[in-house]
Amino acid sequence: MLFLIGLGFGDCKDITVRGLEAVRQSSKVYLEAYTSILTVGAEELEKYYGKSIIQADRSFVEQKCDSMLQQALIEDVSFLVVGDPLAATTHSDLILRARKMGVKTQVIHNASIMNAVGCCGLQLYSFGETVSIVLWQDNWKPTSYYDKIASNRRAGLHTLCLLDIKIKEQSWENLARARDIFEPPRFMRVYEAAQQLIDILDIRSAEGATADSLAYSANSLAVGLARVGTDSQQIAAGSLRQLADSELTLGKPLHSLVLPSEKLHPLEWDMLEIYAIDENWFSENKSRYVKD
Amino acid sequence: MLFLIGLGFGDCKDITVRGLEAVRQSSKVYLEAYTSILTVGAEELEKYYGKSIIQADRSFVEQKCDSMLQQALIEDVSFLVVGDPLAATTHSDLILRARKMGVKTQVIHNASIMNAVGCCGLQLYSFGETVSIVLWQDNWKPTSYYDKIASNRRAGLHTLCLLDIKIKEQSWENLARARDIFEPPRFMRVYEAAQQLIDILDIRSAEGATADSLAYSANSLAVGLARVGTDSQQIAAGSLRQLADSELTLGKPLHSLVLPSEKLHPLEWDMLEIYAIDENWFSENKSRYVKD
């Protein structure tokens, strides 16, 4: 049996009791280590679970995955994933490969940012498509994701923006020379994402887009979230400009950004106000967002 | 401290280790019992947690909530919610009331249908707004939710449909006479929801809507899910008509229905095919949904 087990926010005790039992009965325990990061080190997980953990990076899943599945044919194997195991298609691929080899699979779900984002007070039912924002490079500055954000807003929906994570990236030079040297990990922060969005709004305005077609402005409400579900969770709500200017507010990764819809439920507004960067801004802008 | 603790899919062991510790250190444990149902009985939870559980129905949360918050001012109190505690605004209200009374709160997240729906293979990032489908009554047959489904589809997004749950409902007569007599619980099934959608398509066609504006037809792909995250989880994929005709396929509640977007990622299609009601239908319709 191959267990695909969600770790939630990645602290030892965020695993479910059912998940912990599966880990402890497994002969081998793998940790998916290329799409997200743990709150604690793998060593702490090892200590808590009483099991050695094999880190599975991108090349592992692409190249050595079959040997893991061979093991799972004859004994219990756990594959740990931060968040929920089936939020992205990557692990669908693993399940399909397992089926072809006759390996039974069992998914043990957990919380992920995709549902825990409700912690800011915005109603989950009212989120539209999730978008990913990538760190811009000198010669690559994609802006097309903004269309999805604007489309959600036109449909009256909030947008969750997942911010770029670069783990085990190689420089072009090291890649070309096939050297196993990796760049230090980089995690995009809320202030960077907010500034990038303002840059996109500026670019599109300069290209002639109207304020109406842009849907958002630098003075639109936005919500920054950091380390959701952990003891050090922080949330900051205010205008995009305020978030772009608050480099130090939210601290360490992981960060996510939410762009709320045009109209909010009064309870959504009241919850966001708890996290106001500037209470005056909230008083001045309430009538834009909440119907009396 | 008031802990708001997600139970995931409601089996004893679906709670996280962190959640279980909070329950065991609490003086009082309440179970939110009006928006969802448990997989196991409350007695089993009591046995497993080693704690008495007070069931909090709608009238409790509306009327006796303040006494629970008073307790939480002086000792640890747990408030258990099936799924994740913050998917709906109901519990935002509880947090806001707690803040006003000076009660500290801590949310312990868990999986919910809103992220575990990924188990069918459809990518979570590509879901639009979630809709609720209610059981039609003789004199009340709302169809407006269909506009949200069509709008998601036009934006290239999947739609998760949560199906009606009626718990502790009173007949008009018992309500009028203020008698505490409740109707037996009712849970909408996938086949009923699929038939209702076909009825709406028929009504709108008769009113002159074009096939294009309707976005779906009785021959469109749909996915029924039952008891997600439990040992008896079942998934069935096929046309809306096939789901409407398969009353016995998915068994007991809880059920949910997904209407996928017009185009699927090949891995999404391959995962859904595992759950095909009719493999021939999948072969015949693949080219409609997946680009080569």
Image (tube, coloured by chain):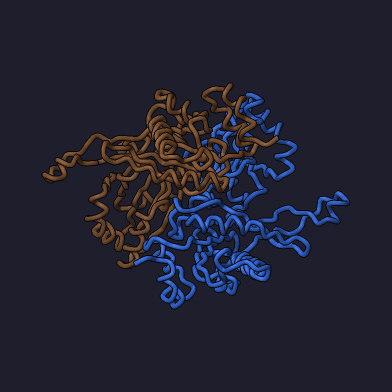
Chain colours: A blue, B brown
Position of the C terminus of chain B by quadrant:
top right
- Determine whether, in the image, residue B105 is placed left or right of residue B129: left
Spot occupied by residue A90 in the image (x, y as percentages of width and height): 64, 41
Q: Residue at x 52, y 58 (%)?
A: A153
Q: Is B115 in front, or is B64?
A: B115
Q: Does any portion of residue B87 appear in the rendered image?
A: yes
- Determine whether, in the image, residue B274 is placed left or right of residue A264: right
Q: Residue at x 28, y 44 (%)?
A: B52
Spot occupied by residue B172 in the image (x, y as percentages of width and height): 18, 42
Spot occupied by residue B170 in the image (x, y as percentages of width and height): 20, 41
Spot occupied by residue B208 in the image (x, y as percentages of width and height): 44, 39
The residue sitting at the left extreme is: B177
Q: Does any portion of residue B256 appear in the rendered image?
A: no
The quarter of the picture where residue A273 lies is: bottom left
The quarter of the picture where residue A190 lies is: bottom right
How many marks do you count on the picture? Answer: 0
Position of the N terminus of chain B by quadrant:
bottom left
Relative to A203, say whether A230 is above or below.
above
Q: Residue at x 46, y 60 (%)?
A: A120
- Determine whether, in the image, residue A209 is placed left or right of residue A180: left
The quarter of the picture where residue B260 lies is: top right
Q: Is B273 in front, or is B40?
A: B273
Q: Residue at x 45, y 68 (%)?
A: A275
The residue sitting at the bottom extreme is: A280
The residue sitting at the front extreme is: B208
